[in-house]
Each structure stands twice: as structure tokens, then as C-alpha cells.
Amino acid sequence: MRIEGGPSSAAAELAVREVQARRTPASMADVRAALSRALEAATGRRPSARTIDVLAAQVSLETAHGDAMFNFNFGGIKGASPQGQTANYLTHEVLGGHDVTLKQGFRAYGSLDEGARDYISVLRARFPQAYTHAVAGDVDGFAHALKQAHYYTAPEGQYAAGLRAAAGVAPAAAPSPAPVAPLSPVDAVAPPATSAELSRVLDAIASTAARIAEPDPKE
């Protein structure tokens, strides 16, 4: 996948340097704090808790709850960071309807705050509609805007459900369906009932999410 638009001016001016891919796990409390600092630095205003809830939920999906964060990359952003650093490692992509494993270059940062600032910068510059929904605390609008911008390849309903679960937001109430005949035991399927099962669902969504690609400078 390619997101159109030129690379950041800082990254364009600096020579790209490959650094070692390293796991940089972070607690969600630390992720939320870094997001809050990054948003306040970018806007001059302290963000609302609802805004942080939406953005932290996406970081949780993209990094397996912070446990699978690499090089302080908050959103699986490909290419080189504004400091020119990139790290190569394996990732899952959905290409032509098939889940494939590829080795690709991802932005690398020296600290959690660097990663948070660039994540916010990318959202504001490349996904302004999604960012607007995040500021409003609108989880479903955020998921829809990201899908429209081809940020991820998972089904929108699943991705939105994963965000809602991670953010602790209840789904919107739906109208009561018309009465239907009860399912037979062989047809009935129970929903996930445990936190472990929910984690597997969220991890499956994260593993199929498309990452943000740097445009090819040759094009």
C-alpha cells in the first residue's frame, strides 16, 4: 500500500540510516502519557481524555497492547523517521486477499516521546478527517475515516469493534431485530466470553492491519 504525498522535509534532507530492529514495549499508561504530551506540544492545548482514549486504542491494536512495539513506532509507520532512521523487520500484510509476511522498513525513533510526536504529526498531516474524529472522541468515525484513507485492510466493522473494546466504549445501540426462529444447537455460535479470547480477536485484527507506506521517491 502507498499513501500519496511527499516524505517529511526533515527525512528528505537527512540520509536514511538503518538501525537495529528492537522491541520497545511500553505500558498503555506510558503510551497515554506520551500521546498527551505530543498533542499538547502540537496544539498548545491539553487533550481530552476521550481523545487519548481513541488514539491509545489504535496504538493498542497496532502494537498488541504495547507489548509488540518496535523502535517506539506507535502506528506501524513505514519508511524513515524525521531523523532519518529506519528498521527492517517482518510484518503481516493482506495482499490480494491473502495474509503474507514481508520484511519491510519502518520508522525508528530514539524515545517514546519521539514516536508519539511523529505519530500525531502523521495523523494530522495525512489523515486529517480521522484526526478530527479522534479529537471529538468518535471511535467509529475514526475507524471509518482511516478505512476510507486505506490505512488498514481489516474489515471496518472488526477494526471499529477492536477500537471500541480497547477504548472501553460500548457500541451504539441498534434497533431491535424482528423475531426470528431460534437457532438449533449446531447453528448457534457463542461470542468470545473471556479476556483471553478477546485479546486473540484484537491481535488478529492488528495482524491484518495495513501499515502506512512511505511514497516511492522515484514516482
Image (cartoon, rainbow, N blue to C red):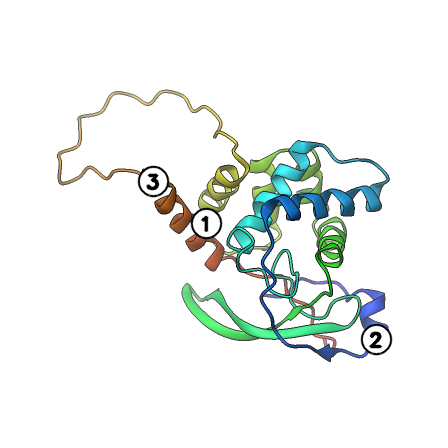
Mark 3 surroundings: few (<14), some (14-19) or many (≥20) residues within 10 A: few
In screen coordinates, is 114 left or right of 56?
right
Tag nearer the camera, 2 or 1: 2
Give whichever of 120, 6 is nearer the camera. Answer: 120
**Quadrant of the image occupied by residue 106:** bottom right
Q: Give percent across and percent down for residue 206.
A: 49, 55
Res. 155 mark: 1
Asked if residue 214 can be seen in this view, the reply is: yes
Q: Give percent across and percent down for residue 91.
A: 51, 68
Res. 14 mark: 2
Q: Are marks 2 and 1 in contact (CB under 8 Å)?
A: no
Q: Give percent across and percent down for residue 54.
A: 61, 39
Give whichever of 11, 182 is nearer the camera. Answer: 11
Asked if residue 208 can be seen in this view, the reply is: no
Mark 1 surroundings: few (<14), some (14-19) or many (≥20) residues within 10 A: few
**Quadrant of the image occupied by residue 26:** bottom right
Q: Which residue is mark 3?
A: 194
